[in-house]
Image (cartoon, helix red, strand yellow):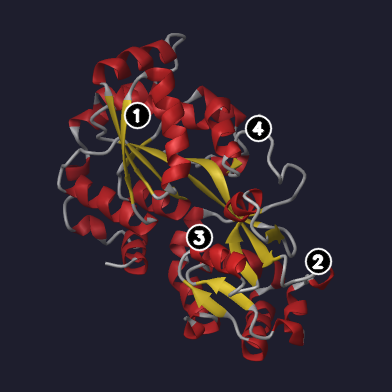
Amino acid sequence: MNKRQFIRLSALSLACAVLPSAAFAQPAARGTMAELAQYEGADRLQRLIDGAKKEGNLSIYTSAQTDDMGALVAGFEKKYGIKVSVWRAGSEKVLQRAVTEARANRNSVDIVETNGPELEAMHREKVLQAIKSPHHRDLIPAAIRPHGEWVGTRLNVFVQAYNTKLVKKEELPKTWDDLLHPRWKGRLGIEAEDQDWLAGVMSDLGEARGTKLFKEIVATNGVSVRKGHTLLTQLVVSGEIPFALTVYNYKAQQLKDKGAPIDWFSIGNPIARPNGIGVARTAPNPHAAVLFYDYEISEEGQKILAGRDFVPTNTKVDTPFNKTQLNFIDARVMLDEYAKWTKLYEEIFAAKSL
């Protein structure tokens, strides 16, 4: 099942028809985990540490790059002595595995760490547990969900990136309309599934004007559509795609810091999507799960993410966007309107996929 099919099923709540909702309500969710998740006593941290040490293990499903998650895991293991196992896959596979295992009562995962829309789908499928954490007060408002079942840990900020050997700084577009200039013919690229970015841009341009404009850009200068943000960013570095419309700022910055010929900027306000963390309702290691949840959104954990050039959501940690207005993508809205934006994105760009 591909990402589109799975998320649409979740958004329509059709997946719940496979098993009755009671199948999701395991005893651990009503007992140990539910009580622990809501506990706010003065001994909360020590209680988590003591319980986690007895459990001794933690299982994480994530879509983050191995090196990036590895840095966070290493800090947690060093501080608490808890052995962490990490399973990594694309966000759609993380979603699929978490929900499939919940339906089958296979309680294997403690922490799910992935994209906002997938976490929101897991909330709807009753996979996640609402957590009360003292660190929530330090997070930006966009990181907090009303239901409390997942929280934004970092922002994927969509920016434009260019090869500094092939594109002069003075040539950079100041508006999207500037991409109609003949100099961009055969030089543009975009990721294959950035419909959430498109929704954000359209909120500024207006849907009718934005659709007309981007169709004109594609017709006039062409846009190479590639699968994967890391790949697209690497193609900018290689010069195969001199200018990319949708890369994540952290990946461009990581490569720039290594001396690659790449830089990034934003046309208008950057579009940002919170990615985050959720604790499984039936986590086999509930103390370790809540402890890791706290660790990732704490100032210490967030500084590790910032050191990897991510944009953390904790206000105590500096980011490149501290003084920049960001346009946030609401995971709930994207889940509900996924079909609409996917169809429009394909109409504009996907037919040009390479």
Q: Kindly identify which residue carries mark 4.
A: 317
Do the CB atoms of the residues marked 2 and 1 lie less than 8 Å apart? no
Q: Position of residue 35 (x, y in %)?
A: 32, 22
The secondary structure type at the circle numbered 4 is loop
Can residue 150 be seen by looking at this rendering? no
How far apart in space, not on screen, are marks 3 and 1 (Cα)?
A: 29 Å
User: Which residue is label 1 attached to?
Assistant: 289
Give the mark nearer the N terminus: 1 vs 4: 1
Earlier sequence position, callout 4 versus callout 2:
2
Residue type indicated by callout 2: Lys
Q: Depth check: 156 or 89 in front?
A: 89
The nearer-to-camera label among 2 and 1 is 2
Label 2, on which residue?
169
Select label 1 or label 4 by which is in front: 4
Decide if residue 119 is on the left or right side of residue 159: left
The image position of residue 95, as x and y in percent, is 33, 53
In contact (CB < 8 Å): disc 4 and disc 2: no
Seen in the image, is 56 located left or right of residue 244?
Answer: left
Q: Label 2: how many residues lie within 10 Å, few (<14), some (14-19) or many (20+)?
A: few
Q: Which of 275 and 266 is in front in this view?
A: 266
Say above or below: 184 vs 129.
below
Q: How crowded is mark 1: few (under 14 residues within 10 Å), some or many (20 or more)?
A: many
Three-letter residue code for mark 1 = Ala
Q: Give the Cα separation between the discs numbered 4 and 2.
A: 30 Å
> Where is mark 3, residue-wise?
230
